[in-house]
Each structure stands twice: as C-alpha cells, then as structure tokens.
Amino acid sequence: MQVNTDTILKEFAQAFEGHAPTVLARAPGRVNLIGEHTDYNEGYVLPIAMDRAIFVAARPRDDGRLRAQSTLFNETVAWPLEELGGPGEPAWANYVKGTAAMLMRHGVELCGADLLIVSELPIGGGVSSSAALEVGTAKALLALTEAFVDPVQLALLCRQAEHEFANSPCGIMDQFASLLTHEGAALLLDCRSQQFDHLPFAPEGAAIVVMDTQVKHSIGGSEYPVRQKQCLAGVEFFRQNDASVRALRDVNEVMLARHAGQMDPTVAARCRHVVTENARVVHASEALRAGAFHEFGQLMTDSHRSLRDDYKVSCAELDALVELACDIGGVYGARMTGGGFGGCAIALVEDHAIDALTRAIKSRYDRQFDKPALVYTTRAAAGAEALHL
C-alpha cells in the first residue's frame, strides 16, 4: 500500500465535517538490521527507517479539544487537552493521548486539533507502528503550533508516552529510528550516550526483504518485561564482582565466560545474548563501512540464533522463515526483527534472488502455517517530517 495524499485529504474531509487539514506528518516504521533487546540494556542498535509509514493529517481547533480518528480501526476519540488523564480505551488512542500529554508536560502550549491517522504499517508486526504513531502525532501537533523540540528530546518524550500510557517498557531505538534516520543510511545508535552515526546502507544489487508472519504480539503484555527483569538480575550479579557494571553493556564475553557457571542458567543465557549481540552490532557496523555484505549477513543469521536459543523470543513461524531464507542462493543472511514472539523476519537478498525467496515462501512456508507470510521489500528511508499544506 502506498498512501495517496489526495485520498488522505478526502478522508479528512469525510471525518471532520468537510474541513481540510493544514499539516501532514509522515513517520516511518523501522526495521532493525541487528541489535535486538540491546537498547534497554544500554547497548548498540542498527536500524533503518522503512519506506512505509504512518501519516497524520491535522488541523487546529479553537475549543481546546484533541480529536483523533484512525482509518485502520475506524474509530474516533476526543478529549479536552486539560483533561487527558491516563491510559484508557481504545488502546491505539493511548499513543496519541500520551504523546500530547508528554509535549504539554515539556512546556509546549498545544492548541486543539483534529487528527486523521492513516497507516501503511502492520500493527504488532515488529516494525514499530507504535513509535511511528507517537512520532507522527508529535510532529503534527508541533507543526500546528509552530513549536520546536530537539529531535533527541522529542524521541525521549515519545518513549515516555509509551511507558506511561501503553505500559510498554521499551528502549529508545524505535523512536530514534523514526525521527533521526537518513535516506540510504542505517542509524548506529549508542543507547547509553544517545550518540549516533549514519552508516551508508544502500547495497547495490540487493534489498531488505521483510517477511511478516502475521502473528501478532503486544510487547506490553508479553514476555518483554520478564526479559528486562532477567537482564537486571544479571546486572546485579556482575555488579557484585565489579562495582563499575551499570548495565549489561558493561559486561564483555570474557567476564561472561568466567562467571556464567555461577549464575542461574536462564539469567546466564539472557546475558549471553545481550553481550554477544552488542559485539555483533559493532562488527556489523564495521562490515557495513567496508561494504562486506557477506559478513554482515552472517552476523544477522548469528543474531537470530542467539535470539532463538539464548533469549528465547522467537517462534516457529519466525524460525521457519529464517531457515527457509538461508537455504536460498543469493541470500546474505536473515533474522527476526523487533521484540519477537511473532511479527517480522528480514533477509538481506540479492535482487536476482528475491523472486526465488518469494516463491519458496509461498510453496513451503504458507503450506505449513495457518497464516500466509506477507512479503515485501524496503529501503533505508528518511526520518519523520511534517509539511504545511
């Protein structure tokens, strides 16, 4: 699906008494190339922004009310800005309400607004539709009031909205990826210092293939918080031996090998994934700088195995897609992307092999599982923007 601006204008008029929007914001989803479950452990991640996005069309209101309609859910919600309160129903609206609340807490004087939300992103598909909704809402509201918030600060406000209004203890990667990415580049982000770099990612003759299992997950209600607690237990263990350890970011493979046998086996496995995954992100960044895509692809596949075996956030559908992709000639590597327990796998694939991969998925994967995989390609796109109409 590619959103047409004229269609958005017509839908806005239908939703909001014939009025026209004055602002259109675009906030992309993200594909994390490598570095999964490292962000909340103060480690490294390497996402790209997708060329699919959430669009938020907006116009100001003079009555201090915030009204939002989602075309995906065909629902409309409204609140007075001074009475946003806390989370409620429907669930999707919490991301809108929470973002507005965080902007106001930051000191932004919002005006009332009508918002129409149109999405190209699968909900619960592992490509961070929630962060895109937060960022798109923030960009639209800021454009209406002609206010400015530094992009890093804005990413942190959006993350706080997800913490408080969606009860999802996410790290910073998704919001940073939606806001701060560049076209044709991956974002190497240090989740501790919040420093980032843009690495060229426009592989000649190859593309990222996204393979959506259509198995939905909700990070806030899943095993995600359990994994965080297990990581914190690992931090406490290592801190007893080295007081400088603040997060698993501070643990290296030598330290892990020395002490893993003294730890709870499950906690040790979770730590092993995070420690080795951080190392893989560093190596993958070096491979990208050198244009070494075979090495990069192998690191992707190694990442999936670690997520499957040590972190245990994969599922049968994701494993089947990764194994199938790695059997196809011309595939550099494959892995699950996102929080896990469903969602998407990705593969770095030479252009000539994309059709072969798609056919194999239809003939092998789709016959094995209840839901067929949705397969599409993406490129490294630009971060969020808002335009005045």
Image (cartoon, rainbow, N blue to C red):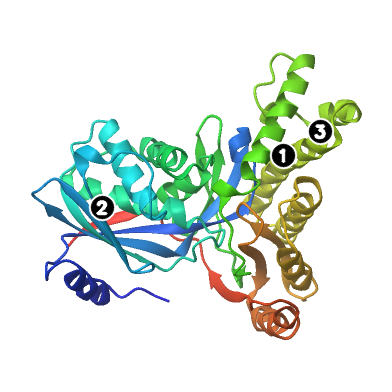
Image position of 34 with respect to 347: above or below: above
- Say what secondary structure mark 2 lies in: helix
Hey, what amino acid is under mark 1?
Answer: Val
Residues at circles 1 and 3 in contact by the CB criterion of under 8 Å: no
Q: CA distance from mark 3 to mark 2?
A: 44 Å
Residues at circles 3 and 2 in contact by the CB criterion of under 8 Å: no
Image position of 36 with respect to 54: above or below: above
Q: Residues within 10 Å of mark 2 (few under 14, many from 20)?
A: many
- Residue 64, image x and y in percent? 13, 45
Question: Which numbered circle lies on residue 140?
Answer: 2
Q: Which residue is mark 3?
A: 253
Q: Residues within 10 Å of mark 1 (few under 14, many from 20)?
A: many
- Residue 201, image x and y in percent? 56, 58
Image quarter in which the C terminus is found? bottom left
Hey, what amino acid is under mark 2?
Answer: Ala
Image position of 130 with respect to 261: above or below: below
Q: Residue at x 39, y 75 (%)?
A: 2
